[in-house]
Image (cartoon, grey):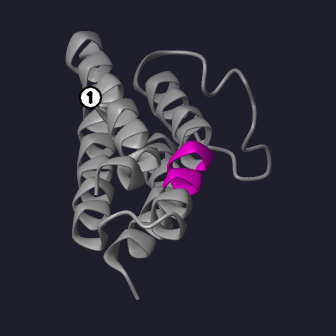
Amino acid sequence: MPLALWCVLAAALLPLIAMLPGKMNREFDNANPRDPGYWKDGFRSRAKAAEQNGYEAFPFFAISVFVAMSQGGAPDWIDRLAVLFILLRVIYIFCYWADRPSPRSMAWAASFLTILALFTSSLWS
């Protein structure tokens, strides 16, 4: 199976990983996991925002991988771009957790450009 497809799975799991540290707290109530008061401030708020953005980015990434693979993009190039996307999203999550908005925005922009490169990869291979 191509590495890019494993990256699709990884991208689907990243939002869950982004939110997990926000739940690692005695105050977290698993009976009411969506309590807006719990996710309102600080690190927890940033973890929740990173999770939500991961869900927003996932469909575009997954579709771009499938388009690249089905339209004849170079498999090695698709794999490299998919791995790059995952690495950039990991950086994005860490920047969100650490409250570093400028590097976070740069990681987001670079990952978005990676999606565009994947989607159009068949045009230049």
Q: What SS does tag 1 mark?
A: helix
Task: Determine the image quadrant of residue 80.
Answer: bottom left
Task: Residue 12 in the image: state x and y as whole percent.
Answer: 54, 59
* Relative side of 41 to 2, left or right: right
Q: Quadrant of the C terminus?
A: bottom left
Q: Can residue 96 be seen in this view?
A: no
The correct choice, above or below, for 52 with respect to 75 in the image is above
Secondary structure predominantly adopted by residues drawn in magenta: helix
Q: 92 or 37, which lies in front?
A: 92
Task: Residue 111 in the image: state x and y as whole percent.
Answer: 33, 36
Residue farthest along the right direction in this orientation: 31
Residue farthest along the top direction in this orientation: 102
- The span picked out in magenta is 59-64
Q: Residue at x 51, y 63 (%)?
A: 71
Queried whether the magenta region covers residue 116, the answer comes back as no
* Relative side of 42 to 79, left or right: right
Task: Determine the image quadrant of residue 103.
Answer: top left
Q: In which quarter of the image is the N terminus?
A: bottom left
Task: Residue 28 in the image: state x and y as whole percent.
Answer: 60, 43
Q: Which residue is drawn at 72% across and 44% down?
A: 33
Q: Which residue is drawn at 23% across and 38% down?
A: 91
Which amino acid type is marked by label 1? Ala
Q: Can residue 84 be seen in this view?
A: yes
Task: Residue 110 in the image: state x and y as whole percent.
Answer: 27, 30
The correct choice, above or below, for 93 with respect to 75 in the image is above
Q: How crowded is mark 1: few (under 14 residues within 10 Å), some or many (20 or more)?
A: many
Q: Name the residue under label 1.
A: 107
The correct choice, above or below, for 103 with respect to 56 in the image is above
